[in-house]
Structure formats: structure tokens, C-alpha cells
Image (tube, rainbow, N blue to C red):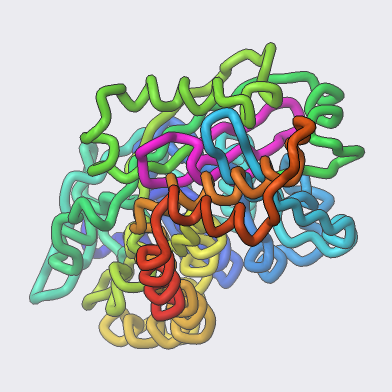
């Protein structure tokens, strides 16, 4: 393809961010090409298993709920604090979410091809199995990409190539990723009959549950999760690389330990593993995200720009990927001048995405506290143990139990220091 044959927009990456952007642009009549290195969209994508649907509703309207291949609507939110064989669960159930859904579990291998189909139906072209090897620059402006097959030119190039964005680094927008910005995510999809999942999680119909674990992998910073799909459970964990390097066990062995924990094993017992994957996960949140995710001729969206919210025991990124892809599309539809579309894109991000990320900016600092994964789950479980243990002796008063447990677990000075740090961070 020569410069005279350029399209309006080239999007590199066929994940949620890239496909959402492509759909919006194609629907507005723009000539769009999505380049995806996988053999199909969704083949290489990985997430814990949930998407908040507000940006999808904006794109597709309420009909989306009838047509999109979601798994289950999440009505049960559970936080599980684990200490050895003991666990304490905080359970929030809201059946109103069935009428006004907030989030659904999903499988990328199913959902992403559907989203790609919507983009193609709107007029976008998707080129699978094509690897982008370099950017084409002219007079300080990005004007196209070099692939393993050809050179392609466009008025605007959009980088949606994931957490370790080759394009953002090549363009000089992002430095090499630092270890502190990353987590290592592992996901296993375990197949079980629909009726078995419903029985084990206390669900009916299309109801779903999200179980988020703290302290389930002893000595390792990070969060673990279970998400219910229709006929499977997504088992995931995102762990701190430094914490992993200090362990004697491998990442795979840590995953097996988590699955065998008594707070996890009964939910997945008898299931068949049908998918296993690992991936780098951006978890720095607001402080490490690109605040100027553009240069002349290039916009950066989704994970490539670091648009995630680290909430400690879970990473929220799917909705921000979709919303940032929509923001990029809206900016180009409003101002198709590739030299000035960047500031317009940033204005779109400043409406919701940046302010929302900023609210949760301090969460990663709180979750750096090692006692979050050791002392505090122990504290919660010891208090519960004292409430429900009866052996015929005279029990201690609850205030005394709490004071003794704090002394054993971390001490009052550490508890106060951690509490103060949490207050300042949040």
C-alpha cells in the first residue's frame, strides 16, 4: 500500500480497546483497518473474567444485553480473607443487579470474536495473523506501520497492542516498563456442569458470583479470584513479581496451592482444565498511566497506555480499555486532523477515565503492605474462631481476644502505622 492509498485509521491490536475504537469509527463512516497478530481476535487476550458494561451500553444500547455472549450477570461479590485452613468471607449480594446489571463474567475467546464481528459489520476491516514490526515516521509524524507483509499508511495510527506496548515505546511515548508497574497474571478456566456451578455458589438462572481472595497464597503479595461462567469457572491470580522471586515454589506450583486451599477447592472439585495462560498485567494504576498518550499521528489506548485501576485484590481494566477506545474514536470523529486530535483525545479521557483512576490512585500503596496478606487475614479469622469455638471452658471477653490477637499478629504500633498509611493513600 502506498501513501496515496492510505486509510483513515490503522488500529494495532484486536482486543477490547482496539475493537471498540474500530466499531465507533466504522459506524461514523471512517475507513478503518485493525491489525491483530493472533489468528483471531481474543486468542491472546487474558483477564480475570469480568467486564463492567457501562461503556458497552453506550455503544450498543440495551439490546446488547440480549445479543452479547456474556457468561453470567454478577450479583454476588465476595471478599475472602484466608489464614491457613481458616477463611472469613464478606458477602455482598444484590439481586437488583439482575434488573440493572453492573458487570458480567466473560470469556475473551467467545466475547472478543463477537465484538470483532460487530466492528466488521459496521465496516471495519480486520487483518488477523499480521505482525507489526515498526512504525513509519515522516517529518516527525507517524504516518503508518511496517508489517511482516507490507507497509500500510493511515491518517492516524492507534496503538492498542497491550501492556508491553511495542508501539508506544517505539514512538518514544513510553519507557521500558518497570517491575513495580507490573504483576504476573495466571488464569485457568475449569469446566464444570452449569447445575454444579449454581449449586456450589448458591446461584439460579443467569446469576453469577465473583470471589476475591486475600492471603490465599501465603507470603506473596497479590490477589486471587474465582469468577463463575455458564459452564466453567475462571480461576485467576495476579501476583507481585518480587514476591514470587522470593518463593521456593514456581508460579505454577503457587497456582496449585491456591486451588487446593479449603476456601477454593470445593468450588472447583471434579472440574476439567480447558484453558491455562499467563500474562504480564499492568497494575500501577493512575500514577503509572500515560497522562499524554499521544503524539502527532498516533494515539495510545487501553493497556498500552496503562489504563487500569488496581483495587488491591482485583485489577479493573476491561471497561477502561473499551472506554478509552471509544474516547479515541470520538476525538477523531470530532477532529480528524491527526496533528491536533491528540489533545482532543486527552479531553475525552479527562471526562471520566482519568478522574475515576485518580480516585483509586492510592490503592496500590495500601496493598504493598505485606501484613495485608498475613497478619490481617489472621486477625480476622482468629476473632471469628473465638466467636464460634466452644470447648466447655470459660471464654475470654471479646476485647481481650482482639487485643491478644493484635499483639500476636503485628502489634499496635504497626497496626496504627498501617492504618495511617491507608487513610493517607485512600
- Indicate left or right for 178 with 395 as reference: left
Give residue 277's quadrant in the image: top left
Which residue is at 68% across, 16% downward? 269
Q: Position of residue 14 (x, y in %)?
A: 45, 47
Q: Position of residue 153 (x, y in %)?
A: 26, 60
In the rendered image, the vertical position of residue 274 relative to residue 385, given as above or below:
above
Which residue is at 30% across, 23% downward? 250
Give residue 64's quadrant in the image: bottom right
Query: Which residue is at the far left?
Result: 139
Q: Position of residue 411 (x, y in %)?
A: 40, 59
For the question of whether residue 93 can be seen, the reply is yes
Magenta span main SS: strand
In the rendered image, the vertical position of residue 194 relative to residue 34, given as above or below:
above
- Indicate left or right for 86 with 16 as reference: right
* Boundaries of the magenta span: 210-236
In the rendered image, the vertical position of residue 280 relative to residue 91, given as above or below:
above
Which residue is at 73% across, 48% downward? 68
In this rendering, the count of numbered labels is: 0
The answer to if 243 sits in the magenta stretch is no
Amino acid at each position: 500500500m502506498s501513501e496515496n492509498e492510505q486509510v483513515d485509521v490503522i488500529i494495532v491490536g484486536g482486543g477490547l480497546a482496539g475493537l471498540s475504537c474500530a466499531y465507533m469509527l466504522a459506524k461514523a463512516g471512517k475507513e478503518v483497518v485493525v491489525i491483530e497478530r493472533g489468528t483471531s481476535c481474543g486468542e491472546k487476550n487474558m483477564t480475570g473474567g469480568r467486564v463492567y458494561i457501562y461503556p458497552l451500553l453506550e455503544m450498543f444500547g440495551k439490546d446488547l444485553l440480549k445479543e452479547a455472549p456474556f457468561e453470567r450477570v454478577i450479583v454476588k461479590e465476595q471478599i475472602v480473607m484466608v489464614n491457613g485452613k481458616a477463611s472469613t468471607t464478606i458477602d455482598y449480594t444484590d439481586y437488583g443487579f439482575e434488573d440493572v446489571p453492573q458487570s458480567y463474567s466473560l470469556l475473551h475467546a467467545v466475547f472478543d470474536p463477537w465484538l470483532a464481528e460487530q466492528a466488521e459489520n459496521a465496516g471495519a476491516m480486520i487483518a488477523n495473523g499480521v505482525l507489526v514490526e515498526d512504525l513509519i515516521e515522516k517529518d516527525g509524524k507517524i504516518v503508518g506501520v511496517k508489517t511482516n507483509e507490507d507497509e500500510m499508511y493511515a491518517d492516524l495510527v492507534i496503538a492498542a497492542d497491550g501492556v508491553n506496548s511495542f508501539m508506544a515505546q517505539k514512538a518514544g511515548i513510553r519507557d521500558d516498563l518497570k517491575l513495580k508497574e507490573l504483576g504476573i497474571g495466571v488464569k485457568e478456566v475449569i469446566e464444570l456442569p452449569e447445575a454444579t456451578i449454581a449449586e456450589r455458589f448458591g446461584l439460579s438462572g443467569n446469576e453469577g458470583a465473583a470471589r476475591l481472595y486475600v492471603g490465599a497464597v501465603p507470603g506473596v503479595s497479590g490477589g486471587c479470584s474465582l469468577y463463575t461462567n455458564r459452564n466453567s469457572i475462571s480461576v485467576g491470580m495476579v501476583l507481585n513479581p518480587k514476591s514470587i522471586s522470593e518463593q521456593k515454589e514456581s508460579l505454577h506450583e503457587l497456582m496449585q496451592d491456591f486451588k487446593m486451599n479449603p476456601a477454593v477447592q470445593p468450588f472447583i472439585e471434579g472440574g476439567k482444565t480447558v484453558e491455562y495462560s499467563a500474562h504480564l498485567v499492568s497494575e500501577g494504576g493512575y500514577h503509572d498511566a500515560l497522562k499524554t498518550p499521544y503524539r502527532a499521528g498516533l494515539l495510545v489506548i487501553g493497556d498500552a497506555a496503562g489504563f487500569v485501576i488496581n483495587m488491591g485484590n482485583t485489577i479493573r481494566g476491561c471497561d477502561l480499555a473499551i472506554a478509552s477506545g471509544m474516547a479515541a474514536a470520538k476525538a477523531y470523529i470530532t477532529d480528524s486532523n491527526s496533528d491536533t486530535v491528540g489533545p482532543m483525545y486527552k479531553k475525552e479521557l479527562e471526562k471520566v477515565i482519568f478522574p475515576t483512576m485518580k480516585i483509586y490512585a492510592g490503592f496500590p500503596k495500601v496493598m504493598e503492605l505485606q501484613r495485608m496478606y498475613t497478619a490481617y487475614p489472621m486477625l480476622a479469622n482468629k476473632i471469628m474462631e473465638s466467636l464460634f469455638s466452644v470447648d466447655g471452658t470459660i471464654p475470654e471477653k471479646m476485647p481481650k481476644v482482639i487485643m491478644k490477637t493484635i499483639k500476636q499478629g503485628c502489634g499496635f504500633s504497626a497496626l496504627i502505622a498501617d492504618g495511617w498509611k491507608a487513610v493517607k493513600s485512600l
